[in-house]
Image (cartoon, grey):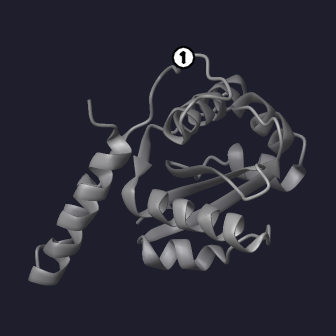
């Protein structure tokens, strides 16, 4: 079975082709896929995709516990930016937030927020706990403006886990 992230890359390629050929911007609305409602228990052998899905399930559980709507969709453009940012952090070792105006501009969003984490032994549950304990990250995870997500979990050369979550509001 194909994972939605792999299919999203195909959709992004088709979307880019549509933009180049002048297809209306409404085609960009189709460039999403659903956040899973539940995730199986993940361990150290889980793939990045399984960890990313489990992370969004945990974020949605935290949002629901605070009376907020769940994030229902991953966004292809935002997800690709999260993946690239996670790879950059892994490559350079520099853990820093990207200027969110880039995420807004490149993906036609009206709002964007980013949470980052790096460490060893980080589970999706631990990542969400760390973010909720940080006022700035908590504000992003629990923002009413957040409607879509892009998520990346990768590892650096030292074996540390790097998590990037971009929450956005499209248009």
The quarter of the picture where the C terminus appears is bottom left
Q: Is 110 positioned to the left or the right of 138 in the image?
A: left
Q: Quadrant of residue 100?
A: bottom right
Q: Quadrant of residue 21?
A: bottom left
Q: Is residue 19 above or below residue 15?
A: below
- Residue at point 56% right, 50% down? 151
Q: Is residue 20 visible?
A: yes
Q: Is residue 26 visible?
A: no
Q: Is residue 30 above or below residue 20?
A: above
Q: Is 65 positioned to the left or the right of 56 in the image?
A: right
| Residue 68 screen position, x and y as percent | 62, 33
| Residue 62 screen position, x and y as percent | 70, 29
| Residue 132 screen position, x and y as percent | 83, 40
- Residue at point 57% right, 36% down? 56
Task: In this rendered view, identify the residue nearer to me: 20 or 93.
Answer: 93
Q: Is 27 positioned to the left or the right of 48 in the image?
A: left
The quarter of the picture where the N terminus appears is top left
Are there few (<14), some (14-19), or many (20+) residues within 10 Å of tag 1?
A: few
Task: In this rendered view, identify the residue nearer to me: 110 or 82.
Answer: 82
Residue identifier under label 1: 40
| Mark 1 element type | loop
- Residue at point 70% right, 67% down? 89
Q: Is 21 positioned to the left or the right of 148 in the image?
A: left
């Amino acid at each position: 079975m194909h994972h939605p992230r792999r299919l999203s890359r195909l959709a992004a390629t088709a979307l880019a082709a549509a933009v180049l050929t002048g297809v209306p911007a409404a085609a960009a609305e189709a460039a999403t896929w659903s956040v899973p409602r539940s995730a199986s228990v993940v361990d150290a052998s889980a793939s990045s995709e399984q960890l990313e899905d489990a992370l969004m399930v945990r974020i949605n559980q935290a949002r629901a516990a605070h009376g907020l709507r769940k994030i229902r969709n991953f966004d292809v453009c935002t997800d690709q930016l999260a993946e690239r940012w996670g790879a950059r952090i892994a490559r350079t070792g520099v853990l820093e937030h990207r200027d969110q105006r880039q995420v807004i501009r490149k993906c036609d969003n009206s709002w964007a927020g980013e949470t980052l984490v790096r460490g060893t032994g980080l589970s999706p549950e631990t990542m969400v706990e760390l973010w909720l304990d940080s006022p700035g990250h908590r504000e992003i995870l629990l923002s009413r403006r957040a409607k879509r997500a892009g998520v990346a979990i990768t590892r650096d050369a030292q074996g540390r886990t790097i998590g990037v979550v971009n929450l956005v509001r499209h248009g």
